[in-house]
Image (tube, helix red, strand yellow):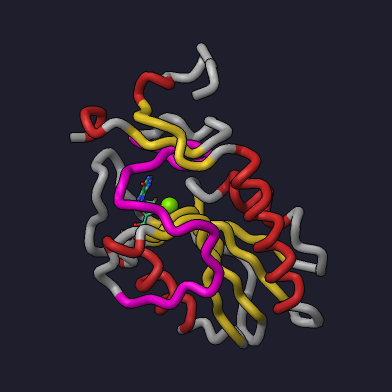
């Protein structure tokens, strides 16, 4: 593990994805998305706040015109596991009717958040709706939802960094690390 005194690296049991690994995969996702959305009126919506780092890297790997928007839904707060329902805390401002929407999310765990969100946004009648997720903890899935673009399949561990937090911390780590269980249990 790299020595970074200003980070609470002692809170991590290890690094899961380093900067180079993330960068390479984000580039590939951008290329694939650029091909798939060529000639389409595309809106990419970033789900705040965990996705902000991934989103800013991903959009710069997309080589076609894309409109950006932002949305915040209720999340974990200070507990490490998801609650059943979601509420919109901050809504996107674009009218997505008839346009091609790409929801960009940091991580899919039980799938509950994305399932509800997708349903909610489908009601606004976009021409198409797809999901791009940096990480997928497939073993923990409870709600059925199709994810069209997945960066990495990861094991059932609580991860932080590259935008992802625990209790508001660790978002500014450049890599994605595994949080020690004793921190959240
Ligand atoms: P789901 O509704 O269970 O799929 O939870 C998805 C949301 O939970 C994500 O958008 C994250 O905000 C949060 N989450 C799930 N797993 C992790 C993790 O390992 N680290 C940080 N946040 C997580
Ligand atoms: Mg999130």
Horizontal and vertical percent position of residue 142? 25, 69
Give me the residue at 26% from left, 44% from top. 80
Horizontal and vertical percent position of residue 117? 41, 70
Q: Is residue 147 magenta?
A: yes
Residue projecting furthest to the top: 5
Give me the residue at 61% from left, 45% from top. 21
Determine the image quadrant of residue 19: top right
Q: Nearer the viewer, residue 81 or 86?
A: 81
Residue 150 sits above or below residue 143 on the image: above
Bounds of the magenta span?
144-166
Q: Nearer the viewer, residue 38 or 24?
A: 24
Horizontal and vertical percent position of residue 87? 34, 61
Determine the image quadrant of residue 95: bottom right
Q: Is residue 179 left or right of residue 66?
A: left
Most frequent secondary structure within the magenta stretch: loop
Give me the residue at 35% from left, 64% from top. 138
Residue projecting furthest to the left: 185
Q: Nearer the viewer, residue 92 or 160?
A: 160
Residue 118 sits above or below residue 80 on the image: below
Q: Is residue 15 left or right of residue 39?
A: left
Mark yes or no: residue 71 visible. no
Q: Is residue 97 magenta?
A: no
Q: Quadrant of the C terminus?
A: top left
Mark yes or no: residue 64 visible. yes
Give me the residue at 54% from left, 35% from top. 175
Q: Is residue 20 left or right of residue 134?
A: right
Residue 53 sits above or below residue 126 on the image: above
Q: Is residue 145 left or right of residue 143?
A: right
Q: Nearer the viewer, residue 14 or 104?
A: 14
């Amino acid at each position: 593990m790299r020595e970074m005194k200003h980070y609470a690296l002692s809170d991590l049991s290890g690094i899961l994805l380093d900067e180079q690994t993330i960068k390479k995969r984000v580039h590939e996702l951008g290329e694939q998305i650029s091909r798939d959305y060529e000639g389409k009126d595309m809106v990419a919506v970033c789900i705040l706040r965990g996705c902000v780092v991934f989103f800013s890297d991903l959009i710069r790997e997309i080589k076609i015109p894309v409109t950006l928007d932002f949305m915040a839904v209720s999340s974990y707060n200070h507990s490490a596991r998801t609650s059943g329902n979601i509420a919109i805390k901050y809504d996107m401002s674009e009218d997505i009717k008839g346009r091609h929407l790409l929801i960009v999310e940091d991580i899919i765990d039980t799938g509950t958040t994305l399932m509800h969100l997708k349903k909610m946004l489908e009601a606004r009648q976009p021409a198409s709706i797809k999901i791009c997720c940096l990480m997928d903890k497939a073993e923990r899935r409870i709600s059925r939802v199709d994810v069209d673009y997945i960066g990495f399949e990861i094991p059932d561990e609580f991860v932080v960094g590259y935008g992802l937090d625990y209790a508001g911390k660790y978002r500014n780590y450049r890599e994605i690390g595994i949080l020690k269980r004793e921190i959240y249990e």
